[in-house]
Structure formats: C-alpha cells, structure tokens
Image: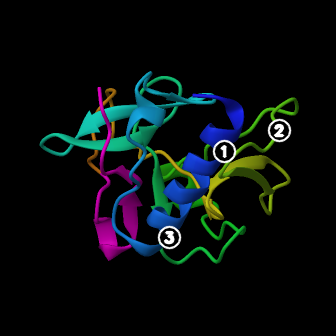
Amino acid sequence: MNWKARSSAIAVAVAIFLGAPGVSLGELMADNNIGRFTVETVLNGKFALADPDGFTLYTYAKDPDFKSICNAACATAWPPVVAQASDRPFESFSVILRDDGQPQWAFAGKPLYRSANDTAKGQANGQDIDDAWTIIEIAAHEM
C-alpha cells in the first residue's frame, strides 16, 4: 500500500475509532506494527494497541483531549507511555507534555498508559477498572 493510500486508510481508521468501540485497520495492520507501536491479542481474542514490548495500552476517560491528569500515585499504577526526545508525532499519534515536563504519547488526542497490573505481554488486566480505563481495541485486525 503506498503512503497516500496508507494515510487515507489511517484517517478512516481514526474516524472509526472516534465513533465506534473499535478501530478497523484491516490490511494496514497486517504486519502488527503502527510506527513504534504494535497490536496484540488480548481479552479472549480481541486485538489491542500495545507498546513496542507488547504491553497493552490504555486511555483514561477522565483525561481531557491532549492532557494527562494521571499524576503521582495514579502514574505509578498507570505508567504513562513516555516519548523520547527524538520521537515525532505521526499518523494519529501525538506527543503531549505532562505536568512533570515529560513527553507522553497520545492516540487520537488521548494520552496513553500501561497498567501496573499487566505483568506480561498480551494481558489486559486494567480493562474497565473504575469504569475509566480502556484498551484501544483494533476491531478488524488481520494477523
């Protein structure tokens, strides 16, 4: 798939993500990678966005767009996905600045976190905790 077609597919996927429970990426995700991120099988066969080590990523419903309010003890239980100084936004991924000054990855405007309860790749032990933490489900992923 060429870059222009890939960008169009990503725009469609973001629109789906914002309006439906799962992102539908189809063949775009056939290699299991989205930039530095991956897709892993979690929760009885669902597919979810994961970090480069395969750990499931979450969003926090109480975060406003492009802002993390998960600090101190919250950030211990829900470690933010920290961006490196050399990382640049791409596709639906952006880098926000946390209150502590650290850069953090966000997807479709929502800051990304891991769960301290996930101890191995492919786990999603943080899903629906406090009705506020949610995986980023990839609805139509082809492995």
Residue position marked by numbered label 1 in the rendering: 7
Mark number displayed over residue 18: 3
Horizontal arrangement in the rendering, residue 112 relative to residue 4 (left or right) = left
Q: Earlier in the sequence, mark 2 or mark 1?
A: 1
Give the left or right position of residue 118, taking residue 55 as reference: left
Which of 138 and 64 lies nearest the eye of the viewer? 138
**Residue in the picture at 55% in, 47% down:** 9
Residue visible at 49% across and 60% down? Answer: 59
Q: Nearer the viewer, mark 3 or mark 1?
A: 1
Residue range of the region highlighted in magenta in the rendering = 126-143
Q: Secondary structure at mark 2?
A: loop
Picture coordinates of residue 123 (x, y %)?
A: 27, 37
Q: Residues within 10 Å of mark 2 (few under 14, many from 20)?
A: few
Q: Residue 83 placed where, x, y %? A: 74, 38
Question: Looking at the rendering, which quadrant does residue 108 occupy?
Answer: bottom right
> Which residue is tagged 2?
88
